[in-house]
Every structure is written in C-alpha cells, then in structure tokens.
Image (spheres, rainbow, N blue to C red):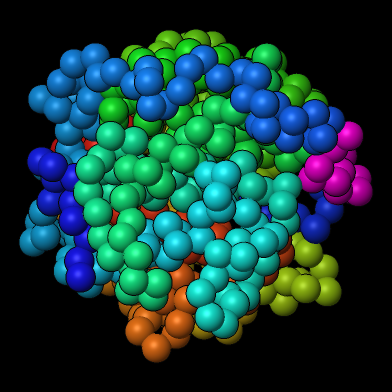
C-alpha cells in the first residue's frame, strides 16, 4: 500500500573526527557527548519547562503563503515533485523515499525522538543493527523530521499509510508532531536545543527543523522557539569567522558551518531575520579555506578532514567540504556566481557517488548532490551523470521486502560516517534527504526555479 500524500500534494559528519583537530595542528580528546548538564537537560524534557503551549491546542495557520502556498518558497514542494521533470525525481527514487519514511516512523521512540543507541526497541522481529551515539539524538531526530518535512508532512497532515512490516496504520502528521514536541521540550533558556558537547551540529539541525516546520505549516507555536534557536546560533558564531563544535570556541570548521548555513536559510525563508554580519563573516571564512582552483578545506586550505585511526584511515576521502562550500556560496550569493563554484563543481563531478568498499560516504553524497543540483543546469550532462551515479549508489542498497524490520533502511556498516557513531537512523535519514534534493531544497531555499 502506497503512502497517502497530504492533501494538495503529490509527497555526521564531515571529517569523521576520532579526535578534534585544532587549528594549531594538535588534537584534543573528544569531549563526552553527554556533558555534566545532561541530566538537567533530560529533566527539562520530562517536565516540559520551556514549552510555550502544546502542539494540539495552540497550532494555528497564519495564512496560505506562510504555510507553503501561493508563491512562497515552500510551495515548490508540491510544484517540483512531479515525476518526469528534467533531472528530477522518478518513480524509483520516490519509492525509496517512501520506504525510508516508513522505516523512520516504525523506529520513532514513544517520547518522539529517534534514539541512536536503542532505536531497536521499536523493532518487530529480528532487531536492526547499527546503534549510534546517544549524544547525537537531537541531530538524528532533526534529520528524521527534515525527511518528513521534505516530503511535505507537517503536524497538521491527515495522511495515513499501513506499515508493511507491522501492519499498523501510521499517521505521519503525528510522527512529525511528536518529534517536534520532543525538540521543543529540550530547548533551554538560551535557545539551544541540545546540551553542550558536539552541540552545534545538533543545534543547527534542530533549528533548521523547527524553522522549516514554522515555514511549511505556518503554525505560530514554532515562531518563538525558531527565533530563539536562531539567536542562539548567531551567538555561538565565532566573531568574524564561523562555527566549530562549541559556541565561540575560537576554532572553526566547514562542516559545522554548512549545517549552520542551512539553518540560516530555513530561518530566512520563514521570515526570521539573519544578521548580515553573520553572513559576511561566513564569506570571509570561506575565502580563507578555499583554494583558488576550487577545493575547500575542513579547517584550513588543503585540509580534507580528520579520520578515525584504525577504523577509517584506509577509507577514501572525498571532497565533502567542497560540496559544503559550493552550497554555501550559492546560498550567500543567490546563485552560482562566485568564482570558486565552477572549479568546485568540476572537482565534485570527477568523483561521483559509487557504492564500493571503503568508498561509501553518504555525507559526501548528500552535500555533493545538493551542490551539483544548485550549481548546474538540470538538463546538463554534468547533472545527469552525477544524478545517475547517485541513484545507482543509493537506491539499490536500500533494504527491501524479505529483510524484516530493516525494510526501508540502509545498513550503516559500509559507510565511514555512519559506522563512527551516527548509525542506521542517520544513514536512512540522510539518504532520504539526498533523494529529496530534486524538490526539497529548491523549495526550501528558493535558489533554483
């Protein structure tokens, strides 16, 4: 049984650091993902101290434009999803998206989160493999929510489907509502959605999800949390530079900066103000880490990113940061105008996605696909070749009928990032997001018509 679409619709990470590289070339031990404040953080979730109402009682749609109608950037989630558009989605990719969403819905915890370490408590039959680090729960929950929002589902969606594994009826609107409730209950008084410790990844993704929920649904409930999340992200930026793992820590990296920039764009399209100074500082940072012939460094020019030694040191390193850099330039300039974009695209085109031993990198495929789509003509050979390679790498390796509870997901073990602590939830959510690039990002960010 297929997914019943919402009414009106047809529907971590960079260097894979084992240790945190510092600008001076030394390394610092990774700070535990659950910092000392974590117990208080979980207490906030249980008690709902920072909620400004409930999703059930205060959700109100402001107007058609704000809710993704008319000519708003969000309206394209309906317009550009049609199968058959040049360089766009196909029945094959949309079937994979639907399967991924079913798996994600099946493995959402009762409290609304996607739990990296014990998502298999939701399994039916044989347990799914691929545990991750619980410190990533905020980021993983946000990625999963973004996948549902990318398909056009909001807390108000009345669509239903039957899960092929459990036989239960699923309401994706409730899935989105419960996930957003979990995020909102964890936001602290400073606006952060995650406790300290790898917080910027988590916080940027959560801010992005809440901003998109605000823009797509028009619900006033998300206005204040989105604004506070954005303000916290602005305050966390290093003066005159960008972001790293911790707020104003002095170091910067392109990966954290990419997630922050996506949150900025979702916020802007939802009517929230992004300071021009923050954008100008990102431009200056990108200038510092970008070589004249295109490649973008992780923390400095020529720096491809760290690896987790004895686990991924033999993995092929792709130009993930170049994909991030191209995306940022397009967002900052409103199109592929900067001189580094064309050479960056050429570097990405020379390394298309391929599911091969020690070469699988869903993070690179995600940012590379986004960058190539934004910066190339959808009918060009450059995009066609990349797109064909991406679909061939991603879709056939999704678990299908006969794989039990794993149906709809992707195994994390072959992936350099997923095996380092992100796990099966990450692998499934980010591959769904990659397959939604045809309609999700143009709609979300309004860069491409």
| Magenta highlight on residue 425 | no
Residue 357 in the image: state x and y as whole percent: 58, 84
Q: Left or right: 209 with respect to 242?
A: left
Magenta highlight range = 24-36
Residue 287 appears in the rendering: no
**Front in this rendered view, residue 45 or 97:** 45
Identified at 20% across, 70% down, the residue is: 1
Badge count: 0
Q: Is residue 91 above or below residue 182?
A: below
In the rendered structure, the answer to whether residue 176 lies left or right of residue 190 reads: left
Prevailing secondary structure of the magenta residues = loop
- The image quadrant of residue 425 is bottom right
Q: Is residue 85 visible?
A: yes
Q: Is residue 35 magenta?
A: yes
Measuring from the top left, give residue 44's x and y in whole percent: 70, 27
Relative height, residue 315 to residue 401 (above, below): above
* Position in image of residue 383 (x %, y %): 26, 60
Q: Position of residue 116 (x, y in %)?
A: 65, 57
In the foreground, 270 or 40: 40
Q: Residue furthest bottom?
A: 402
Could you tell me which residue is drawn at 40 percent across and 72 percent down?
Answer: 166
Q: Quadrant of the C terminus?
A: top left
Residue at 69% across, 60% down: 117
The quadrant holding residue 385 is bottom left
């Amino acid at each position: 049984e297929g997914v019943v679409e919402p009414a009106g619709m047809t529907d971590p990470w960079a260097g894979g650091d084992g240790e945190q590289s510092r600008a001076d070339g030394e390394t610092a031990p990774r700070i535990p993902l659950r910092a000392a404040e974590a117990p208080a953080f979980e207490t906030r979730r249980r008690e709902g101290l920072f909620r400004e109402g409930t999703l059930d009682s205060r959700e109100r749609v402001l107007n058609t434009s704000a809710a993704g109608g008319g000519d708003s950037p969000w309206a394209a989630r309906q317009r550009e999803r049609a199968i058959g558009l040049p360089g766009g989605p196909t029945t094959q990719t949309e079937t994979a998206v639907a399967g991924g969403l079913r798996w994600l819905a099946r493995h959402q915890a009762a409290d609304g989160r996607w739990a990296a370490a014990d998502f298999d408590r939701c399994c039916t039959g044989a347990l799914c493999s691929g545990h991750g680090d619980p410190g990533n729960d905020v980021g993983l929950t946000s990625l999963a929510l973004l996948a549902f929002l990318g398909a056009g589902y909001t807390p108000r969606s009345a669509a239903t489907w039957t899960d092929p594994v459990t036989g239960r009826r699923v309401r994706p609107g409730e899935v989105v509502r419960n996930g957003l409730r979990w995020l909102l209950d964890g936001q602290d008084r400073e606006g952060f959605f995650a406790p300290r410790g790898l917080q910027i990844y988590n916080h940027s993704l959560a801010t992005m999800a809440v901003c998109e929920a605000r823009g797509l649904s028009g619900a006033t409930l998300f206005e204040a949390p989105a604004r506070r999340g954005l303000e916290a992200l602005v305050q966390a930026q290093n003066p005159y530079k960008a972001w790293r793992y911790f707020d104003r820590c002095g170091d910067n990296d392109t990966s954290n900066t990419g997630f922050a920039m996506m949150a900025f764009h979702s916020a802007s399209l939802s009517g929230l103000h992004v300071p021009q100074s923050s954008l100008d500082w990102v431009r200056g940072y990108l200038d510092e880490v970008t070589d004249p012939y295109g490649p973008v460094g992780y923390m400095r020019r020529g720096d491809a990113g760290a690896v987790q030694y004895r686990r991924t040191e033999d993995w092929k390193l792709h130009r993930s940061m170049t994909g991030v850099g191209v995306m940022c330039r397009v967002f900052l300039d409103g199109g592929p105008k900067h001189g580094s974009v064309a050479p960056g695209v050429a570097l990405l085109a020379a390394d298309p996605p391929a599911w091969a031993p020690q070469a699988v990198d869903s993070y690179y495929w995600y940012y590379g696909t986004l960058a190539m789509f934004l910066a190339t003509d959808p009918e060009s050979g450059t995009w066609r070749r990349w797109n064909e390679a991406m679909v061939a790498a991603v879709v056939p390796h999704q678990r299908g009928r006969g794989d039990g509870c794993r149906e709809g997901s992707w195994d994390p073990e072959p992936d350099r990032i997923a095996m380092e602590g992100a796990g099966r939830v990450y692998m499934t959510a980010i591959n769904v997001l990659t397959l939604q690039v045809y309609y999700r990002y143009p709609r979300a960010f309004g860069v491409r018509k």
